[in-house]
Image (cartoon, coloured by chain):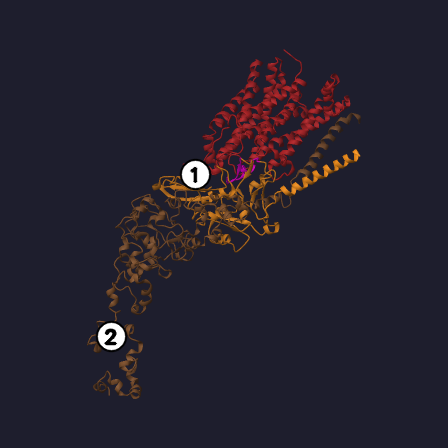
Chain colours: A brown, B orange, C red
């Protein structure tokens, strides 16, 4: 046994070292390891305590609600504030106040207003890899199309970043529409022929397929040569088969091309000064965003440069009073003061000459409201002793009236021979 | 007299030292921010999934920048990036990702006139159900949380780099400064509070969607039941949770 | 479709496993190889190997002591290295490292202690003062030496040697398995990697023993045990054939199956690895030693000087072959991008923390240790010309 002692010693030493190792493991093993799996459970809560840096839109909207309301309705609704303005955590902490705000300087809290990297072209520059439904431009071509000679003109001269295309209906509420294609999605330039004239061309939807009347009337109009349906009907693709289409008609959208600006070509496309074109400012009210159509067309496809024959509705003479009270300058866009005084003067209108007595029945029958401009409603009674004109069926029912009020009333207008026509 | 004084003096010294130590512990100990953390049972109700819609991505790179700012991603490494594929008329494929698309894409890679098909593919950690990176971590620093997000325990990682080799998607890297492995955490600190991950938040085209796969009414499940999608390297058996709508065969 | 652009994933610009990770399997390869040679003497009673048996055993330890150095150098957080034993995740091939390494270390140290006990006791008896005390500590306070103890020791050594063979195989084989099981890497993923590593480890073990044995004897002008050398050379030839055949078969299999990965791997072999793999590993350092060793093993060369020189050159070349094989596997695999469309670049810097100078030092130190050990306990007898 003595001779094996050295072996026993060394094995005991080894066992001892192993035991030390096991004890060391028990002591030094990180706590919470193995609680819910082969990992340190505390790590999960440590990770949850990381600071939040990027702010989301609802946080910005708490203070900047005015911008938010514009932003939400227009084409940039899905572009979060952080994309252009930066993460914003210091800004929010600074303005919230409290302990954490004390370590932040004003310079740190300030957010850049303008987007740094190349401006709008950063997203909107035309790249082949960008989906064809995404609005992207080649700057030179775009400016050429709009006749803006200086390429250094900034995009924001026309497009407000929070309201780039002045949509009337938020994109999310625009109508669902089957997918439509533009020729330029496959072809570099818009081809001369229609696809129907090309043998073996894949069948695609053209607006003409469902909307022939609109397309026909549009093709007879000046806009036809220069723009196509989707220039104004902004199309938003949702997936491979559907999208949402947007109706348009917003005056401010029209102004993107037609407003006179110093950096734009003066003559082409036809330009107007705004808002003096329609008088003073505050012309566009919420209810009147489609103001261009009021004068230039009933429907936008029939839009013509010339003003349409009679832009006013049929009851305009009676309804124009409230409009004129607040927007007289608009009237003055077309009418002179002479036009007003043709009706509005203390002296009789010109029409009331010696023949008026004979002429007024036929006039009064159709335009009673016009008479009521000056005359009170029951003014007819003064002469006629009866409300005028005669109600329907008076021919059959005049017996009672004649009996009650006496024939003298009828004799105001009618001679005796008149009754003998029937009687 | 002397002895008692000495004893008292020593006692006084000991107690005052102890008092100072205890007092200073309370005075200088940082109070940890009172942030509520979700309990284990709460976390079990979630299974975070992710969708990348390659038909919508425009390659602006906002996601890459937002992630970098949110998570202090070191220079030259990426937790998420955007790749561009361009296929020309003679069937050649051009793939690029300039600095991970952190500054977007400046111009077409191939000749513009020759390109017939082109698209962007954002990439990020797939948070696989059978993640090889969790399998190979020797110390248990790479793990799956109860809500099935694949995470790295920075306090426990030894920086051996085995997980970086094992990931077929190339989403992991070693943070040189800290000496530990790092990768997309699905902005774990954000999703616990109901906020979207930084990349989802910043995408202007809704090309990135995230959500709870266990919730039948979540947006992510709705999209998964409507659109057709693919997975990256499905033959490797990693069972990834990141679904790619419009995935092209050229994307690896 | 052809890819014209060289595309790699953005995180692949920097590779993770540097030349340190090339050295680690190289060193453990020599550990395993040397131990197996030593064990063949003890277990299978190959008397011809007696001359080098102890030398092989101690070389195994010398390399083993330095096996962890490249790993620790490479870890991002070396101070946390013990987590591998404290919180091991056993689904990971690497988690076994701590335990296997410690276990193998115990076996080797124990075997050496038992083998050298007689000499140590002898030295203990002849010295005095502090040196005597040191020897007593090493003997764990027991200087008992007689027939019985020697018999027990011998039996235990045989047991340890036989037990140690599979452990040595696992120590080095798990590294091969580690690489071969990474499905994400097209160059590494193969079930053969475990076997290839073990066989090339034996080649490197034999080669380093032959190299050192001949070098030392040449330096000291001592005569060589020709039988021993011949046996080792024959085995080197045999194992080298197996190892290179396996390596080539692996590549042949991938190219024949022609799956997705062959396209990019072919570009790797034709491009980035043309010099280090095609010309050096296979061309120069496999074919030439093969020819040399075929001649020395199969034909009778009368001029022993020429024969031994040929063997020596062949073993040097094979040492380099194994080193290049490790390089081509570890670095080559990381040069290929997982996008299957491009390659990244790597060459270690000179003065980097994981650079060439440090690598050179790491390889050198075990030889220095052997030299120092030899000073205390000479490996080879007093025979001279």
Asked if one can make out residue C263 in the rendered structure from this viewpoint, the answer is yes
Image coordinates of residue C216 in percent, x first then y, are 61, 17
Decide which of C201, A345 is in the foreground and name it: A345
Image coordinates of residue C102 in percent, x first then y, are 66, 31
Judging from the image, mark 1 belongs to the subunit labelled B
Dot 2: element: helix
Query: Is the residue marked by circle 1 packed among few (<14), some (14-19), or many (20+) residues within 10 Å?
Result: some
Q: Is residue B166 magenta?
A: yes
Rendered image quadrant of residue C217: top right
Quadrant of the rendering where the N terminus of chain C is positioned: top left
Image coordinates of residue B29 in percent, x first then y, are 63, 42
Rendered image quadrant of residue A353: bottom left
Query: Is the residue marked by circle 2 packed among few (<14), some (14-19), or many (20+) residues within 10 Å?
Result: few
Dot 1: element: helix
Drawn side of residue A186 relative to residue A65, left or right: left
Drawn side of residue A74 relative to residue A344, left or right: right
Q: Specify the segment rendered in magenta.
A: B159-176
Q: Is residue A379 above or below residue C230?
A: below
Q: Residue furthest left?
A: A354
Q: Is residue C383 magenta?
A: no
Q: For mark 2, what is the residue?
A: A363
Q: Which mark is residue B98?
A: 1
């Amino acid at each position: 046994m003595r001779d094996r002692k050295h072996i026993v010693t060394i094995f005991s030493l080894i066992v001892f070292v192993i035991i030390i190792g096991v004890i060391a493991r028990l002591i030094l093993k990180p706590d919470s390891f193995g609680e819910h799996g082969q990992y340190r459970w505390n790590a999960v809560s440590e990770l949850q305590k990381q600071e939040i840096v990027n702010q989301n839109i609802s946080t910005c909207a708490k203070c900047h609600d005015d911008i938010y309301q514009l932003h939400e309705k227009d084409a940039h609704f899905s572009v979060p504030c952080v994309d252009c303005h930066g993460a914003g955590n210091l800004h929010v902490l600074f303005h919230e106040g409290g302990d954490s705000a004390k370590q932040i300087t004003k310079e740190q809290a300030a957010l850049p207003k303008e987007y740094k990297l190349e401006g709008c072209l950063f997203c909107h520059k035309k790249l082949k890899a960008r989906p064809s439904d995404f609005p992207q431009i080649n700057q030179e071509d775009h400016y050429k199309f709009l006749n803006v000679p200086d390429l250094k003109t900034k995009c924001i001269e026309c497009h407000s970043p929070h309201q780039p295309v002045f949509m009337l209906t938020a994109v999310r509420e625009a109508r669902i529409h089957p997918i439509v294609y533009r020729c330029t999605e496959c072809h570099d330039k818009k081809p001369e022929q229609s696809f129907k004239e090309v043998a073996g061309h894949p069948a695609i939807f053209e607006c003409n397929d469902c909307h022939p009347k609109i397309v026909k009337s549009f093709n007879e109009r000046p806009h036809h040569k220069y723009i196509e349906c989707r220039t104004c009907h902004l199309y938003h693709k949702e997936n491979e088969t559907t999208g949402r289409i947007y109706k348009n008609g917003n005056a401010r959208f029209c102004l993107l091309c037609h407003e006179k600006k110093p950096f734009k070509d003066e003559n082409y496309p036809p330009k107007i000064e705004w808002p003096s074109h329609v008088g003073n400012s505050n012309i566009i009210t919420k209810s009147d965003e489609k103001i261009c159509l009021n004068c230039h067309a009933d429907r936008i496809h029939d839009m013509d440069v010339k003003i349409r024959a009679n832009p006013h509705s049929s009851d305009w003479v009676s309804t124009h009073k409230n409009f004129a009270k607040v927007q007289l300058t608009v009237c003055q866009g077309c009418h002179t003061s002479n036009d007003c005084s043709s009706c509005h003067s203390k002296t009789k209108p010109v029409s009331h000459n010696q023949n008026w007595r004979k002429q007024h029945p036929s006039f009064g029958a159709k335009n009673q409201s016009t008479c009521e401009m000056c005359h009170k409603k029951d003014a007819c009674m003064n002469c006629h002793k009866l409300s005028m004109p005669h109600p329907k069926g008076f021919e059959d029912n005049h017996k009672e009236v004649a009996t009650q009020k006496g024939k003298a009333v009828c004799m105001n207008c009618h001679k005796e021979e008149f009754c003998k026509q029937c009687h | 007299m002397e002895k008692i004084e000495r004893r008292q003096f020593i006692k006084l010294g000991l107690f005052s030292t102890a008092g100072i130590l205890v007092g200073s512990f309370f005075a200088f100990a940082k109070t940890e921010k009172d942030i509520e953390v979700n309990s284990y049972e709460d976390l079990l109700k979630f299974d975070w999934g992710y969708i990348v819609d390659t038909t919508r991505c425009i390659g602006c790179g906002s996601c890459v920048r937002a992630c970098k700012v949110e998570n202090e991603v070191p220079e030259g490494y990426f937790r998420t990036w955007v790749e561009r594929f361009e296929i020309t008329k003679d069937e050649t494929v051009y793939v690029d990702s300039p600095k991970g698309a952190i500054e977007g894409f400046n111009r077409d890679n191939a000749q513009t006139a020759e390109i017939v098909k082109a698209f962007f593919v954002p990439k990020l950690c797939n948070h696989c159900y059978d993640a090889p990176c969790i399998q190979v971590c020797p110390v248990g620093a790479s793990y799956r949380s109860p809500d099935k997000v694949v995470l790295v325990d920075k306090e426990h990682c030894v920086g051996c780099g085995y997980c970086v080799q094992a990931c077929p998607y190339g989403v992991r890297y070693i943070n040189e400064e800290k000496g530990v492995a790092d990768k997309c955490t699905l902005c774990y600190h954000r999703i616990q509070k109901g906020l979207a991950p930084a990349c989802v938040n910043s995408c202007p085209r809704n090309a990135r969607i995230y959500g709870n796969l266990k919730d039948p009414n979540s947006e992510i499940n709705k999209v998964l039941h409507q659109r057709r999608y693919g997975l990256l390297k499905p033959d490797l058996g990693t069972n990834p949770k990141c679904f790619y709508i419009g995935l092209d065969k050229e994307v690896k | 479709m052809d890819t014209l652009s060289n595309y790699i994933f953005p995180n692949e610009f920097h590779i993770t496993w540097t030349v340190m990770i090339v050295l680690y399997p190289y060193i453990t390869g020599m550990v395993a190889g040397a131990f197996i040679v030593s064990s063949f003497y003890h277990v299978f009673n190959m008397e011809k190997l007696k001359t080098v048996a102890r030398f092989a055993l101690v070389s195994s330890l010398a390399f083993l002591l330095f096996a962890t150095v490249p790993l620790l150098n490479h870890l991002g957080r070396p101070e946390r290295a013990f987590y591998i034993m404290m919180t091991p995740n056993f689904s990971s091939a690497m988690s076994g490292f701590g335990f296997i390494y410690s276990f193998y270390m115990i076996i080797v140290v124990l075997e050496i202690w038992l083998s050298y006990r007689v000499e140590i006791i002898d030295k203990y008896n002849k010295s005095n003062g502090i040196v005597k005390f040191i020897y007593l500590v090493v003997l764990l306070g027991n200087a008992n030496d007689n027939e019985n103890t020697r018999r027990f020791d011998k039996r235990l050594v045989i047991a340890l040697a036989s037990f140690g063979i599979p452990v040595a195989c696992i120590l080095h084989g798990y590294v091969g398995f580690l690489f071969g099981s990474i499905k994400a890497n097209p160059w590494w993923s193969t079930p053969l990697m475990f076997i290839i590593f073990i066989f090339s480890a034996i080649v490197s073990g034999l080669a380093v023993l032959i190299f050192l044995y001949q070098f030392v004897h040449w330096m000291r002008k001592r005569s060589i045990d020709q039988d021993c050398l011949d046996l080792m050379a024959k085995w080197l030839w045999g194992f080298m054939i197996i190892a290179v055949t396996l390596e080539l078969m692996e590549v042949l299999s991938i190219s024949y199956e022609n799956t997705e990965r062959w396209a990019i791997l072919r570009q790797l072999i034709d491009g980035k690895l043309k010099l280090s793999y095609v010309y050096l590993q296979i061309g120069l350092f496999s074919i030439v030693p093969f020819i040399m060793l075929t001649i020395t093993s199969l034909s009778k060369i009368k001029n022993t000087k020429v024969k031994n020189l040929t063997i020596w050159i062949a073993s040097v070349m094979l040492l380099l072959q194994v080193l290049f094989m490790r390089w081509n596997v570890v670095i080559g695999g990381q040069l290929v991008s997982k996008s299957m469309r491009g390659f990244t670049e790597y060459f270690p810097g000179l003065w980097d923390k994981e650079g060439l100078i440090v690598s050179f030092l790491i390889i050198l130190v075990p030889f220095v240790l052997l030299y120092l050990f030899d000073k205390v306990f000479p490996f080879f007898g007093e025979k001279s010309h």
